[in-house]
Amino acid sequence: MPLKIISNDIIKVKADAIVNAVNPSLLGGGVDRSQYHASVSKLLEECHILEGCQVGQAKIIKGYNLPVKYIIHTVVPIWYGGESNEEKLLTDCYKNSFALAKDYKLESVAFPLISSNTFGYPNDISLKIAISVIGDFLLTNEMTVFLVVYDKASFVLSEKLSSSIKQYIDDRYIEEHPINCNDKFEEEYELNESHLDYFKDFSEEVPVSSRKCKRSLDDVIKHMDETFSQMLMRLIEDKGMTDAETYKKANIDRKLFSKIRNDINYRPSKSTVIAFAIALKLNLDETKDLLLKAGFALSHSSKFDIIIEYFIENKNYNIYEINDALFTFEQNLLGV
C-alpha cells in the first residue's frame, strides 16, 4: 500500500488509527486540543489509566467519537541539538507505532510530522526520518500510511536539496511556445539515437539532430509492437524484480498493479508510468521510452516533469523523497 502525503487536520483523516505525539504523561501534545474541541473526554480518562509511557515508546487507546478506531500515543524526544540520541528515539516512535498497528491488524494509519513543532525538532531532519522509517516499513508490509501536514510551512526539504531543485527548474523551465514541425506531429517528444528504432518505418526520415518535434500519438502507437503493460512486465523481469517489490517501490496499490498486469491494454496515468520508472531505476531515455508506450512525454514547460528529470539525472530513485519534493513545489505526487 502507498504512502500518501496530505494537507489536513489529522483528526479529520479517515484511517484505522491516528498517531498522537505526546509527553511521557500521555497528556498534552499534538491532537489533544482537537480531542478537547471534539468533546471526547473519555480519551483523556483512558490516557490516565495507561499511567504514562517512555520516550520512543507507544501505547494505543480507542478512538471513541473520532472518525478512527484507535489513537496511538507515542512519546517524542525533545530536540537538544542532536547530541542526546534524538534521532534514534524519533525513529523508535515510528517503529513502535507501526508495531502496534500491526498487532491490532490495522489497514491504515495517519502520522503527523512527529516532533517538528512542539518538541523543537528541525523540520527537515524530522521529515527525513519520517520518510526513511515509513519507506522501510512499507517495503515489507501492506498498509496505507498517511503523512498529515496541518501547516504546510512546517513541511520543508533540506535547504541544500530545495535550492538545488529550484536552480535546476530555473535553468530548464521554458514557457510553452509553437514549434515549426510537420502538421502530423502533435505530441511533444525529445529524440535521440535510441528512439529511432521506433520510427524506422516512417515514410519521412527523422534526423537525430531534431531535438523537439510534434507527432501524432496515433502514429506512435501504430508503430509499437508492445503495450505499456507488456513493456512494464518485460522490464520487471529484466530487472530481476518481483511484482511486490516493484509496486511497493512505485508507491502503487497492489490492486492497481493487478489491473495493469491482467490488462495488456491498460491505460495508466502519467504519474503511474513515472512511478514505475522510478521503481525500476530507469535512466532518462528509458523513462521516456516507457512514457511513450503510454502516450506521454517529458516537457521542460512542466515543473513536474523537470523535478522528475532532476531526480533521475541525480540517480535518486527514492519515491518518497521525490514525493516530498513534489509536495513542497505543489505538484501532483507519484503513485497515489
Image: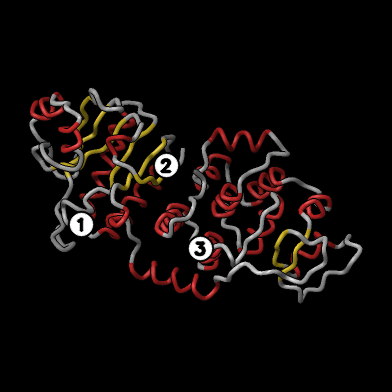
Q: Alpha-carbon distance for marks 2 and 3?
A: 24 Å
Task: Report the mark closest to the observer, 1 or 3.
Answer: 3
Q: Quadrant of residue 36?
A: top left
Residue closer to the observer: 28 or 312? 28
The residue depicted at 70 percent of the width and 52 percent of the height is 295
Query: Is 181 located above or below residue 130 in the figure?
Result: below
Q: Which residue is mark 2?
A: 138
Residue closer to the observer: 169 or 195? 169
Q: Residues within 10 Å of mark 3 (few under 14, many from 20)?
A: many
Relative to 170, 78 lies left or right = left
Relative to 255, 108 lies left or right = left
Colouring method of the image: secondary structure
Query: Is 77 located above or below residue 108 in the figure?
Result: below
Q: Which residue is mark 3?
A: 307
The residue depicted at 53 percent of the width and 61 percent of the height is 308
The three-letter code of the residue at mark 2 reads Leu
Task: Report the mark closest to the observer, 2 or 3.
Answer: 3
The three-letter code of the residue at mark 3 reads Ile
The three-letter code of the residue at mark 1 reads Tyr
Identify the mark at residue 121; answer none if there is no mark. 1
Q: Residues within 10 Å of mark 2 (few under 14, many from 20)?
A: some
The residue depicted at 30 percent of the width and 60 percent of the height is 124
Residue closer to the observer: 170 or 191? 170
Answer whether labels 1 and 3 touch (C-beta < 8 Å). no
